[in-house]
Amino acid sequence: MRKLLVGMMLILSGPTLAQEAPGKVLEAAVNQVIRPGMSAFAEKAGVLEGSVAALCSDPSAEGLETAHDAFADAAIAYGHVEFIRIGPLMEDNRAERLLFFPDRKGIGLRQVQAILANEDASAADVASLRGKSVAVQGFGALEFVLHGTGFEALTGAEGQFRCQYGAAIATNISDIADELAFAWQQENGIAAHLMQPAPEYDDYRTPTEALEEIVGLVSHGLEATRDTRINPFIAKADAAPKPKLALFWRSGLTMAMIRANLEGMRRFIDQSGVARNVAEKDKGLDNSIAFEFSNANRALDLVTSPVEQAVEDPKQVQALHYLVLVTGSLQAQVGEQLSAALGLSVGFSSLDGD
């Protein structure tokens, strides 16, 4: 009987140790990372909207450069929060409307090219643009407008329609960013449910469910970064590199976006304190995760050329392949080791539809 009681106490003590202060972790995740990140994205998206509108009003090389910079800033701001694929981002097709990727068959590209070739006036109107394919109304479409074939026309009157279409996309991105920031600020919305789960909620009924959600966001975000942002364009044993499968290769933002994705997840783990909310025997996990994120940053620092050149340079190729290994290690640390340390279940893949 004594052994049975001791065994029961050990079983019950695991979740108790792992959940000593889940409320603080959840509150920090929302207030220190998610809300500020969504607000920063909305701010940068607003600047993007204004810069493209200004370019249309007064076409010039300087105005185009300003729009290019604003595009980069807004895309990177989105990259920091892109992994937060719950609630508002997953409603109303916002994630796909913001960034339709990967576009493995080039369907979105052909649709954007057709709009430009036919000067489809309905695509230059924000309201009607929102009713079109998700592939023609987000960052991918705007990148082609600003950086794709024929973008030089934006510096003169001949690029007027192209610019108007770009302005509609930029406004759409800004509107979606505002919707995200607003939704996360609501007192009785997803933020409240995530920070203070309750049995009557349909989304987060217990702290365990909420913790599983935030740990899963990082685990699946790391998987998506590796499998959709890096692996598709690097060389394989039986295949040559395919740099034009990389996200944002036209604008030269491929690696900057990968860095933003990883930085957003690193910040989420660090500032939420989720990896420090474990039993004493697992206290080293927080440092191990931080160390692997540092390794990822070191690998990113070695990829200094545009992606078309990077995939042909042995040192940069080595860094890219190492980045694949590091993101895989991080996914195992977060999705398996941290999950187990917290007594959670974070098992399914966000990429396979399970």
Image: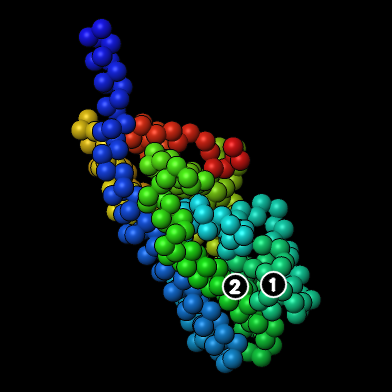
Q: What is the three-letter code of the residue carrying label 2? A: Asn
Q: Which residue is identified by label 1?
A: 129
Which residue is nearer to you in this view: 25 or 44?
Answer: 25
Q: How many other residues sit within 10 Å of disc 2, few (<14), some (14-19) or many (≥20)?
A: many
Q: Are marks 2 and 1 in contact (CB under 8 Å)?
A: yes
Q: Which residue is farthest front?
A: 200
Q: CA distance from mark 2 to mark 1?
A: 8 Å
Q: Which residue is mark 2?
A: 172
The percent position of residue 13, horizontal first and vertical second, equals: 27, 27
Amino acid identity at mark 1: Leu
Query: Sequence order check: which comes first, mark 2 or mark 1?
Result: 1
Taking the view exactly as shown, the residue that stands out farthest to the left is: 280
Q: Is residue 65 visible?
A: no
Q: Please state the horizontal and vertical placement of residue 10, each as a whole percent of the image.
A: 27, 21
Number of numbered discs on residues:
2
* Residue pictured at 31% horizontal, 47% vertical: 23
SS type, badge 2: helix
Q: Residues within 10 Å of mark 1 (few under 14, many from 20)?
A: some
